Image (cartoon, helix red, strand yellow):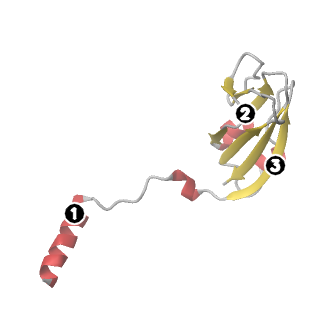
Amino acid sequence: MKKLALVVFALVLSTGSIRAQNNTTRFFYQYDHETITVSTTAIGFTTAKVNAAPIGAQLVTVTIECASGTTCTTRFLADGTTPTSSVGQQVDYQYSFSIYGHDNIVRFLAIRSASTDSKYQVAYYR
């Protein structure tokens, strides 16, 4: 019986059916957070938080909030171009999104595209 169990275990290993999960978030840990007000002038993340030693932010998650009973749609770009109220990736309030890669995080800019400012709840990971 022991030999059969050993053979089955060896076959399982040889077929590659035991694998690590493909979950990138398990390699990051949160080291800081902040609240950013997104208004009529494009704004990025706080430089000191993005570039914090030793390696800076590798992942940022953002949750968008606004005052009760209002809508606060925003737009963002992470290519160094300044977004406008009609240009950029549109994100509505109550949604979350993530930006991966230090270069993208450094170049990130957001602006409101509705009549109400929004609050970005930002978490920084490395």
Amino acid type at image mark 2? Tyr
Q: Marks 1 and 2: CB-CB under 8 Å? A: no
- Residue at the image point whose x is 70% and y is 49% from the top: 57
Locate the N terminus by quadrant. Answer: bottom left
Q: Disc 1 versus disc 2: distance between alpha carbons?
A: 49 Å
- Residue at the image point whose x is 87% and y is 25% from the top: 41
Camera-nearest residue between 108 and 93 = 93
Quarter where residue 114 is shown: top right
Camera-nearest residue between 85 and 60 = 85
Q: Which circle's residue, 1 or 2, is located before the other in the chain? A: 1
Question: Any mark on residue 93, and which?
Answer: 2
Q: Secondary structure at mark 3?
A: strand
Amino acid type at image mark 3? Glu
81, above or below 96, in the image: above
Q: Badge 1, how many Cα within 10 Å: few under 14, some, many 20+?
A: few
For mark 1, what is the residue? 14
22, above or below 81, in the image: below
For mark 3, what is the residue? 34
Which residue in the rendered view is the most extreme toward the top?
Answer: 86
- Residue at the image point whose x is 49% and y is 53% from the top: 23
Point out the frontmost of discs 1 and 2. Answer: 2
Q: Which circle's residue, 3 or 2, is located before the other in the chain? A: 3
> In the displayed structure, does residue 23 sit left or right of residue 32?
left
Point out the frontmost of discs 3 and 2. Answer: 2
Q: Position of residue 39 (x, y in %)?
A: 86, 28
Q: Disc 1 versus disc 3: distance between alpha carbons?
A: 48 Å
Quarter where residue 94 is shown: top right
* Whether residue 56 is visible: no
Q: Secondary structure at mark 2?
A: loop
Amino acid type at image mark 1? Ser
